[in-house]
Image (tube, rainbow, N blue to C red):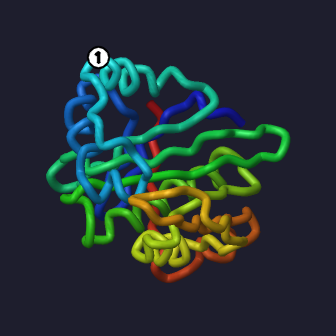
Amino acid sequence: MDFSVKPVLTGPLTVLRPFTEADAEVMGALMEDPEVIRFTGGSPEPLSPEFLRSWYGSRSAQADRLDLAVTDRFSGEVVGEVVLNTWDPDARSCVFRTFLGPRGRGRGLGTEATRLIVGHGFDQLGLHRIELAAYAFNPRALRVYEKVGFVREGLQREIELRDGAWVDEVVMAVLEDEWAVHRGHPAAVEVTATAR
């Protein structure tokens, strides 16, 4: 198992594909969205075009993480990203994170994209555990993660000072045996994967 193969994962609504340098401009614009900044803890200061081109142009060369663009299957538009990183090969675990820009929200794309990459992590990469942390003030994301099979494991209280107030973070994870049961859920997505 390693993360060097960068798949294309296709569901009914989304296609997850490897990033290229050409995605830098749209990803930079998505990162400037106020909701993305609020829910990811991102910086309101834009990243330089040079940094973004270097970052997204190098994602396919990373053998210890998987960064995929979330695209609308019908329009081909990049609407966000999904990432498996902080890989621990001995524990067969990694961390999941994602964000969607305005045109990717409220249409089921985030739920499907999460199912696709989590399924790939367990079914193709042989992971045992995928975990995440999300702000407690982001109920929409927490609902999506629970719908996909993540289980709340705890609360990191007052982890960060945001806009003059302390905020909590919810820790969640899904294990391979839980995914095996959840994969059969009627809302689960059938995945078509191709290597790139």
Residue reaching furthest to the bottom: 186
Residue reaching furthest to the right: 90
* Count of numbered marks: 1
| Percent x, y of residue 169 | 58, 65
Q: Which amino acid does label 1 sit on?
A: Glu
Residue reaching furthest to the left: 75
Is residue 149 in sight in this rendering? Answer: yes
Query: Which image quarter holds the C terminus?
Result: top left
Q: What element carries label 1?
A: helix
Which quarter of the figure has residue 125? Answer: top right
Say which residue label 1 marks.
50
Please report the residue visible at 44 percent of the width from the left and 76 percent of the height from the top.
139
Compared with residue 17, is residue 149 higher up or lower down, i.e. above or below? below
Relative to 82, 3 lies left or right: right
Please report the residue visible at 73 percent of the width from the left and 62 percent of the height from the top.
176
Query: Which image quarter holds the N terminus?
Result: top right
Is residue 172 in sight in this rendering? Answer: no
Relative to 124, 37 lies left or right: left
Nearest to the observer: residue 16 or residue 194: 16
Please report the residue visible at 19 percent of the width from the left and 59 percent of the height from the top.
103
| Percent x, y of residue 35 | 29, 59
Which quarter of the figure has residue 174? Answer: bottom right
Relative to 75, 62 lies left or right: right
Q: Residues within 10 Å of mark 1 (few under 14, many from 20)?
A: few
Compared with residue 89, is residue 62 higher up or lower down, i.e. above or below? above
| Percent x, y of residue 24 | 27, 29
Compared with residue 28, is residue 81 higher up or lower down, i.e. above or below? below
